[in-house]
Image (tube, rainbow, N blue to C red):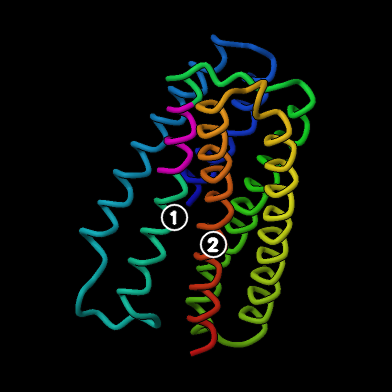
Amino acid sequence: MRVVMQCANEVPPMILALCDGDITGLGGYRNGIFALEKSADVIKNELRAHLPRRMFMPVDRRDLLEILDLQDSIADTAQDIAGMLVLRDMQIPKDLHEPLKQYTQRCVDACNQLGKIMEQMDELLETGFRGPESEKVMYMIDELNKIETDTDQKAADFMRLLFKHEEEIGAVGTILWTRLTHWIGDLANYAERVGNRHRLLLAR
């Protein structure tokens, strides 16, 4: 998860580089995200290979594997965003820069909130996913859900502005920006889904 968070946190400065017209910076962030995503894949495969099948654990192995796959989806999505921003000239009107930056950062805020939740895993394992520690994590998951809801509103606001500039951006550009907007939102969506998997674990 720490590597996944690093991957996600490279997306806002990449958007900043796009807005500033920094082509060199875009390429550098793209390479960094691709390298981090590859590292995340290596760790994911190691965990899959070594997670015990028969040893008793306080949670089901399948639940942990599902959480692992959803975490990996965050890194995969960051890679998709980075690839799109470098492969095509994704120009965007100046008055959309700030809403795009705010929306992107808020989506990454959701990933960072998930990172804080994952850091509690050791304590949760020690307490058998019960007691005050589980209540603390439940509260953190509620905060994650609030952040994700905020990203939905910011996405709607950005898309409304985007469509106002549809003629300027062009049909193809608008379609690609719509796709990119959804991918950025997926960073928060996957983070929320991991958080909700934790909620189910704590509710058992």
Q: Which of the marked residues, 2 or 1, is nearer the chain's N terminus?
A: 1
Q: In the image, is residue 53 part of the stretch drawn in magenta?
A: no
Q: In the image, is residue 81 part of the stretch drawn in magenta?
A: yes
- Residue 178 horizontal/vertical position (percent): 56, 39
Mark 2: secondary structure: helix
**Amino acid type, residue under disc 1 in the picture:** Gln
Mark 2 and mark 1 in contact? Answer it, CB < 8 Å: yes
Q: Residue at x 33, y 48 (%)?
A: 43
Q: Is residue 157 left or right of residue 14?
A: right
Q: Residue at x 49, y 84 (%)?
A: 128
Mark 1: secondary structure: helix
Question: Which segment did they paint magenta?
Answer: 76-84
Q: Is residue 11 above or below residue 151?
A: above
Q: Which mark is residue 138?
A: none
Q: Residue at x 74, y 27 (%)?
A: 97
Q: How far separated are the C-alphas under marks 2 and 1?
A: 10 Å
Residue 121 or residue 69, whichever sits in front: 69
Q: Residue at x 50, y 78 (%)?
A: 126
Q: Which residue is mark 1?
A: 71
Q: Which residue is mark 2?
A: 118
Task: Characterize the local packing of mark 2: few (<14), some (14-19) or many (20 or more) Cα atoms within 10 angstroms.
Answer: some
> What residue occupies the far bottom of the structure in this picture?
204
- Would you identify the image quadrant in which residue 38 lies? top left
**Amino acid type, residue under disc 2 in the picture:** Met
- Residue 166 horizontal/vertical position (percent): 65, 29
Residue 90 or residue 123, whichever sits in front: 90
Q: Between tags 2 and 1, which lies in front?
A: 1
- Residue 32 horizontal/vertical position (percent): 46, 26
Q: Is residue 8 above or below residue 142?
A: above
